[in-house]
C-alpha cells in the first residue's frame, strides 16, 4: 500500500509541476487575443525563413488593445520557439514599429 501512495504522490507532484509551466492569459479565448496570436505566430514563422522581414501586426490594435498585444506576444513566443528562433524581436507597447525594428 505504501508503494501505491508513493506513486500517486509522485504523480501528483509531476502533474502540479507541469501545470505550473503552462502559462495562460486572462485574455485567452477573446477574438482580439486570437487575432493577435495568429499575427504573432505568422510573424515568428516568417522570421524563421532566411532574409524574411515580414511582420504581421495590427499596429493600432497592438498599441490600444491589451488582449491583442498579449495574443501577439504569446503567438510570437510559441511559434518562434517552435521554429527554433531565440531572438523573436517582440516589440514592447512603447517600441517604434516598422521594418527597421524587425
Image (cartoon, rainbow, N blue to C red):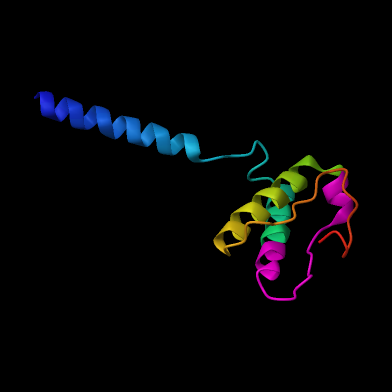
Residue 56 location, quadrant: bottom right
Instruction: Magenta stretch: give its range.
Output: 42-63
> Does 10 appear in magenta?
no
Residue at the location (26% across, 31% down)?
10
Name the residue furthest front: 86
49 relative position to 6: left or right: right
58 relative position to 46: left or right: right
Q: Is residue 21 above or below residue 53?
A: above
> Does 58 appear in magenta?
yes
Name the residue furthest bottom: 50
- Assign the C terminus to one quadrant of the image: bottom right
Residue 31 at least partly seen: no
- Assign the N terminus to one quadrant of the image: top left
Indicate the position of residue 76 as horizontal and vertical percent values.
67, 55
Residue 12 location, quadrant: top left
82 relative position to 62: left or right: left
Residue at the location (34% across, 35% down)?
14
Residue 49 at least partly seen: yes
Name the residue furthest left: 1
In the image shown, does 59 or 45 lie closer to the viewer?
Answer: 45
Q: Is residue 94 above or below residue 39?
A: above
In the image shown, does 13 or 66 lie closer to the viewer?
Answer: 13
Residue at the location (12% across, 28% down)?
3
Residue at the location (70% across, 67% down)?
47
Amino acid at each position: 500500500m505504501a508503494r501505491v501512495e508513493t506513486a500517486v504522490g509522485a504523480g501528483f507532484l509531476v502533474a502540479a509541476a507541469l501545470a505550473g509551466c503552462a502559462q495562460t492569459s486572462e485574455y485567452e479565448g477573446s477574438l482580439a487575443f486570437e487575432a493577435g496570436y495568429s499575427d504573432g505566430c505568422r510573424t515568428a514563422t516568417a522570421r524563421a525563413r532566411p532574409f524574411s522581414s515580414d511582420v504581421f501586426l495590427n499596429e493600432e490594435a497592438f498599441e490600444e488593445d491589451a488582449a491583442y498585444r498579449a495574443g501577439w506576444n504569446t503567438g510570437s513566443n510559441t511559434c518562434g520557439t517552435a521554429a527554433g528562433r531565440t531572438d523573436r524581436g517582440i516589440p514592447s507597447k512603447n517600441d517604434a514599429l516598422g521594418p527597421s525594428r524587425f
